Amino acid sequence: MSNLTLTIDKDYILSIRHELHMYPELAFDLPKTTALIRRELEAMGIPYTEQYGKSSIVAFLNPTCTVRSVALRADTDALPLTEKTDLPYASKTPGKMHACGHDAHTAMLLGAAKALKPVENALSCRVVLIFQACEEGDQSGARLMVEDGVTELFDEIVGMHVENWLEAGSVGICPGVSMAASHPIYIEFFGRSAHATLPQSGVNALAMAVETYNGINALQATRMNPFSQYVCSVGMLRAGETDNVIPDYAEMMISLRTYDKETERFIVESIRRMAENAAMLRGGTIAFRDEEKALPLENDPTVSARVLAAAAKVVGQEQIVTMPRKLSSEDFSFYLSRRPGAFLRLGTRNAEKGCTTLPHNNDFLLDEDALPLGSRILAQYVLDLKEDDK
């Protein structure tokens, strides 16, 4: 099927990205974003459903094909940042910004769909287009979709993420386990308020939290294997309102990233015991909540080889790069827990254009000239699939 002609519409891809970028939305609250996706799918005559997950859309090319089915996934949500760029299409909503490239991911997937639609009847597979909400939020949008059975729709899956570590025009992948699990922890400490001059009459929730914080640092210094690969960072500790009141409430948020279950379980249970003990010694209580927000992301070697072969046709073999393992996380991993797949990195760095800032910063920029390459790679991967590629 690779001899079919693909038409990649750069102007279309960029216009979609600009519209999404101007109106960023968070987590599952995506009315404008999902309306745009529906609008474009309907204009292309591509059927879709919203029965999987929440605020997410699944669309189909060559929908009647039963031989094999492959999925292409884009995430759609933004971040709670106020944009500080001079882009003519900068965010119009203070406190919200597409600072991780999900607007580009959605635009590239729609661009690939537009290229594949005219040749869908010649494809050797069904193509499942996944527009997934809440990759960045407190809950995993991918996990909800998997729980609703979305992985029953396809045999393998490919995702793509813009990457400002890589020069524009290059494509990277990390073989095997490439990203860490994400296991956020949220602890509330409950005590009893008192006047600051009568600390003995209160139960100091801040003291419980500080002891827990110090315990976490001691845990990492004295009880962890130095060769373990993990990150355990307290990102938020909040308590009290004024100087002359002993606080009766404190809260702590922790980011935990690991590659293996044993390390994850040990750290979570150790922190739970620290917090419980700190509260008990002072006569307080805690509420402890932890969640598996992402699994370790492991790229399948067979799918990786196929999608890299397609990428090499687009950018050249010399532009294919082996990426190092990261301790950052991606909920794309939930799809990979049920089906084989690969997660690609599309280079979008361009120093001459000022596109060097990494994601999750309020001045994040990417080289848009790379985005049509992303659409073409996704479409080429679909074209190159054969009926016996299983």
Image (spheres, helix red, strand yellow):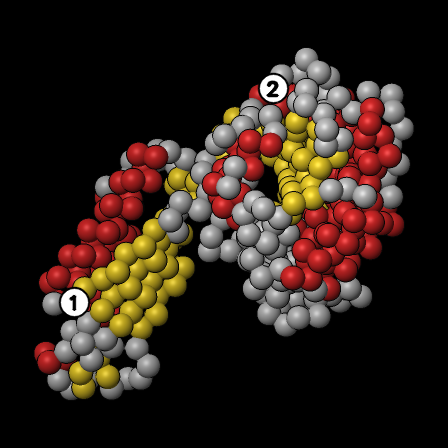
Query: From what the image shows, is residue 118 above or below residue 90?
Result: above
Of residues 158 and 226, the one drawn nearer to the viewer in this rendering: 158
- The first of marks 1 and 2 along the sequence is 1
Q: Quadrant of residue 295?
A: top left
Of residues 313 and 367, the one drawn nearer to the viewer in this rendering: 313
Secondary structure category for the residue under label 2:
helix
View extreme (top): residue: 388
Residue behind mark 1 = 284
Residue behind mark 2 = 302
Horizontal and vertical percent position of residue 34:
67, 55
Look at 39% across and 63% down and name the residue there.
236
Q: Amino acid at mark 1?
A: Gly
Can residue 326 be seen?
A: no
Look at 83% across and 49% down and name the residue there.
43
Q: Quadrant of residue 246?
A: bottom left
Horizontal and vertical percent position of residue 353:
78, 53
Secondary structure category for the residue under label 1:
loop
Quadrant placement of the N terminus: top right
Look at 34% across and 58% down and name the residue there.
186
Query: From what the image shows, is residue 375 above or below residue 190?
Result: above
* Residue 198 appears left or right of 120: left
Query: From what the image shows, is residue 240 above or below residue 389?
Result: below
**Marks 1/2: CA–CA distance:** 54 Å
Horizontal and vertical percent position of residue 292:
40, 45
Label 2 crowd bin: few (<14), some (14–19), many (20+), radius 10 Å = some
Look at 26% across and 40% down and name the residue there.
266
Q: Amino acid at mark 2?
A: Thr
Quadrant placement of the C terminus: top right
